[in-house]
Image (spheres, helix red, strand yellow):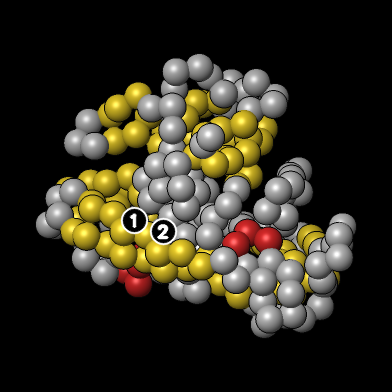
Amino acid sequence: TSATDPYPWSGTYFSGMPVMLVANATGEEPFTGWLENGVALPVESDTLWVNPVAGLQITALFGDEDGGGGGGGDHQTEYSGLFAEGWNMVSLPVLPENTNYLQLFPQASPGTLYGFDGMYELRQNLVASEGYWLYFENAANVTLSGAVLEDGLIGLQPGWNLIGGLSEDAVLNDPGGIVMPGTLYGYDGSYQLSDVLEAGRAYWLSASAAGTVTVVPAQ
């Protein structure tokens, strides 16, 4: 991926039929590695075979040999947020080394991270730009460190989608016009209509058709 122009890897794939990904640098920055759902893979080759499964996000990194690159690279940041007692809608505000929800939110109740892909699904790890429900027995201050999430590409399905934002306030870029107007809702004890995605929070969004939108920093 590139911080300014993430390549839309999209299409129809089938579980059990591996797909070959090739990372091609378009500028002078060299390929430096792969991330699987935010976790570095022990693969040095710019070619990667993957088996498509629900919730899988593969990121190719480009940058300096010391690890800098797209999607944040050596640009690190820290996030602090207050999460309420009860259910919260959460997302990744940074790209950490470990994306397990209990490593990121140790105050959360075990077994309560739910993603949404047409139906609720119990999850263990968070993926950038995806949204989740997570339950806290008590209100909790959370501090996270990791690479900056500078932009994101979100695949939407017709109907309601649970999405996340970036490391700062963000907005949606919808060149295909698939987002239903007035359907971005956050949650703070009740649903609230929004036009900005705040870092660390998740939002419901309705789409009229399948397609992709990008998440970019709010101006």
Please give the name of the residue rendered at 27% of the width and 62% of the height, measured from the top-left corner. 142
* Dot label at residue 113: 1
- Residue 58: x and y, percent? 66, 61
Identify residue type, mark 2.
Arg
Q: Is residue 150 left or right of residue 160?
A: right
Could you say whether the residue bearing mark 2 is in a helix, strand or loop? loop
Identify residue type, mark 1.
Leu
| Residue 200, above or below 63 | above
- Residue 130: x and y, percent? 49, 48
12, 76: nearer the viewer: 76
Q: Which quadrant of the figure has residue 79? A: bottom left
User: Crowding at label 1, few (<14), some or many (≥20) Cα neighbours within 10 Å?
Assistant: many
| Residue 134, above or below 188 | below
Q: Is residue 193 left or right of residue 106?
A: right
Residue named by callout 2: 123
Q: Is residue 34 left or right of residue 88?
A: right
Please give the name of the residue rendered at 57% of the width and 66% of the height, measured from the top-left corner. 75
- Dots 2 and 1: beta carbons under 8 Å? yes
